[in-house]
Image (cartoon, coloured by chain):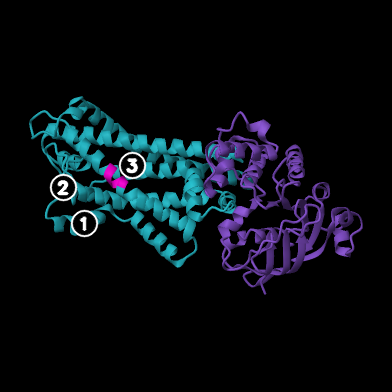
Amino acid sequence: MKRRALRKAKNAAFLALSLIATMTGLVCLAAILWTLLSHGLAGMSWHLFTQMTPPPGNQGGLLNAIYGSAVMTLLGILIGSPIGVLAGTYLAEYGRKSRLSAVIRFINDVLLSAPSIIIGLFVYEIVVVRMGHFSAVAGALALAILAIPVTLRTTEDMLNLVPVGMKDSSAALGAYPWRTTISVLYPAARSGIVTGLLLAIARISGETAPLLFTALNNQFWSTHLNAPMANLPVVIFQFALSPYKDWQDLAWAGALIITVTILVLSISARVILALLQAERGSGR
Amino acid sequence: MRAPLVVPPEPAKDLGPPKIEIRALNFYYGDSLSLRNINMSLADHSISAFIGPSGCGKSTLLRVLNRMYGLYPNQRAEGEVLIGGRDILGPTVDVAELRYRVGMVFQKPTPFPMSVFDNVAFGLRLGGGVRGAELKSRVESALRDAAIWDEVKDKLHADGRSLSGGQQQRVCIARAIAVKPEVLLLDEPTAALDPISTLRVEETLQALREKYCIVVVTHNLQQAARVSNVTGFMYMGELVEIGPSSQIFTSPKDRRTDDYVTGRFG
């Protein structure tokens, strides 16, 4: 009886500790969101989406930064995801057990957790220094390098989830591996691969360090890919550290915009994944 | 010694030469020998069933006939296997073309992530040349032959994965026969199905017997007895005995076959 009471007490203590830990995490998160909302909502207005970043003391918006972020994120995904998806396909379908795959997988894991500022420095050295100036292209390249490991990993994982029988059935009909991959495996893993792309977009759309070294910033409207381009993370970095109240307000508003965007992307990714699993579940 | 790559003249239907001839076939997984000196002939327009305990090599034998084993490393076959008189183990054989001639259906239904129609049309589109109205009629006749047409004719554009397990398996059979293969291999085609679906698939096989050389591997002895003309019993990588199904199930010559079909082991 005594032993049983002790076990119950231990269980209660463990449960309490877990709850405290969970609450700590949640309270921090809620505090961050609350701060962001209370500061960010104050600065929310249509001007954000119609006007350029202003000089101190003037009214303005974030249009050029939003545009720049969208363009560089899109370019980054367009450059990075085909490489990631194809490399993931190689690992899952062609070189499953080769030594080369083991090496690629290891390097990819390193890249996945590499500090993004190092990626920024790398592109700075390779592109910016040679071109002689900051540019949107360099920014997009840095983001592409960050997108590769995310898409590679999810593509490989999702292709590995496709039942072997499906691949064998396609081969048994006389399909060559490339045909099987394109016509059977990609459609079977489609939702998973799209989820990976969304997660990659979420990851790179909030990156600051790589853009600081590559695209830098631009106070004006610019669509030149060969010139410095404004973007939300760097504008936030610059404006938040400034002594001007209206700049700080814009920084909060920008931070809210990025957070909401990433939240929406992550939630869509989860919803898609859940739908995928439901589909798999009923398919068996 | 390999037989020359010539197709023999069209045989008379009832007493034609065998569709599949296997001579001195050995099969290795790495270093371990898993098929030992298999010799046999299988007739066209008939169903041959292979029975035996798990690991006896019956599925391996099936995977030799369309060289599926080539998809996995460290597996190799020695000896001679002729299908329609053509050697299939030689190094110059186009494996994709061989698999086009030799269809296969697996234990678990494997509908592709596309519509029922596209599933059945998959092989036809691979071969190229079949389009439009001809494609439609080939898909329909394959679905009819697989005894699934009436159930899916109104949902040809639904996802193949939305059908029931038994329907999926018959769509997979339709997919395999749509390209009019010379041989149809089935690897425990009803192991994952309920009794009613199993019955449907067995009826389908009966109907297909007229047109194809069918080889089926099964754990289900009654199924082998019900559907097959010829039954082979395999044990530990050897083909112990092969003969007319009625004889194998009533008066087998080998003691091991007798023990197995009467349920003393396996």
**Callout 1 and callout 2 share a chain:** yes
As helix, strand or loop, the secondary structure at mark 2 comes to loop
* Chain A as rendered: colour: cyan
Question: Mark 2 and mark 3: span between their CA atoms?
Answer: 25 Å
Q: Which mark is residue A121?
A: 1
Residue wearing tag 2: A226
Quarter of the image where one finds residue B10 = bottom right
Amino acid on which disc 2 is placed = Asn
Is B94 displayed left or right of A234 in the figure?
Answer: right
Q: Which amino acid does label 1 sit on?
A: Leu
Prevailing SS of the magenta stretch: helix
Q: From this viewpoint, which residue is outermost toward the bottom?
A: B1
Q: Which of marks 2 and 3 is nearer the N terminus?
A: 3
Provide the residue span drawn in magenta: A74-78
x, y (%) of residue A12? 53, 41
Q: Is A263 within the magenta?
A: no
